[in-house]
Amino acid sequence: MKNLVLGALVAVFALSGCRKDTPMLNVYAIIHDEEARALTDLFTQKTGIPVSYLRATTGELVSRVIAEKDDPQADVLLGGASSFHIQADEAGALYAYTSPAAQGVPPYAVAPDGTWTGFCLLTLGIGVNEARFAQKFPGIAVPRTWEDLLNPAFKGEIVMTDPAASSTSYLFVQGQLQRLGWDAGWDYLLALAPLVGQFPDSGSAPPKLIGTGEYAIGIAYLHALTKYRSLGFDIQLVAPPQSVGDVDCVAILKNAKHLDAAKQFVDFILSVEAQELMSSLDFTTPVNPDARGVAGSIPIADIDVIDYDTKQASEQRKDVLDRWAKEVR
């Protein structure tokens, strides 16, 4: 049913926004609908260029970008970790564009060939619903490290997304493989998986499920957990040592039908105004050195992160997901 609905949406999207005789800029959006709507509306206000966007999961849209590379039904891919953009680039689906607005952006946030650019920093952490945790686990300390999650008492009370569908969870999986090594990393993942009560597709699901008290513990981006806490949900944030961070990226699709508008959109997304808007909505950390994160967002400098190899993550993706499907799901 989900595939049928997505297909119907894309059909409407293609008919309304991808004709060669219209100036409409078409965007595939991996970021949340609220952020996609706010950013595209502001872009239209500033440039006069109308935007149509389709919101779906990382896995669905990256697969679509690759499948459509010879005749893309969108001009821009907005959101998704760098490893997924590398995957699309290696498939020949992205257009190389180095924006003048990328000056000052950290080197790790810009593709060497200019095919993608990061626009905000994302770091994984642990969220704990304090009331449910206290009820379910009296006398047990809140998990402070990734290893603490392996407590057998937590069985069924952990929620994390499916790495095959979500860039959030694939980043977590790769984080364990890179910090521990391949064999020890898989030992960790195979010990954790039986304790997980649910593997939803969307990276936005764990913070919500933790906040509403359906699970005691969740693995998610810290900015997403912070956002739910700011709304009054009962969430304690934990930034474990040896965490992993990545950048949410924007890229122009190869053979984009509205290339000039797509370049203007990338320039806009990297601007101070757009990045501060994004942070105000989602508590993310801007990559533009002149942009300020919203109060309550956690600076990357305050978090212990490993030296994450995005190229390795991209190259290993098929092998990792094949093994995950075989041994976990």
Image (cartoon, rainbow, N blue to C red):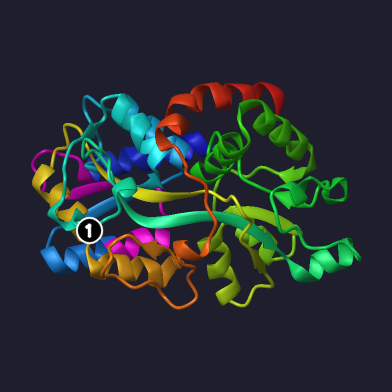
What range is drawn magenta here?
A: 17-39
Looking at this view, name the residue that lies furthest to the right. 139
Q: Is residue 64 visible?
A: no
Side of 40 where 215 appears, left or right: right
Q: Residue at the location (38% across, 43% down)?
A: 9
Residue type, numbered disc 1: Gly
- If the image is split into quadrants, where does the N terminus sit? top right
Q: Position of residue 321 (x, y in %)?
A: 56, 27
The residue pinned by badge 1 equals 104
Q: Nearer the viewer, residue 37 or 270?
A: 270
Magenta residue check for 149: no
Q: Nearer the viewer, residue 113 or 133?
A: 113
Q: Position of residue 45 (x, y in %)?
A: 17, 69
Q: Is residue 190 visible?
A: yes
Side of 245 where 218 appears, left or right: right
Side of 98 where 208 appears, left or right: right
Q: Considering the numbered disc 1 on the image, is that residue within a helix, a strand or a loop?
A: loop
Residue 290's place in the image compared with 112, above or below, is: below
- If the image is split into quadrants, where does the C terminus sit? top right
Magenta residue check for 22: yes
Residue 112's place in the image compared with 78, above or below, is: above
Q: Position of residue 312 (x, y in %)?
A: 45, 30
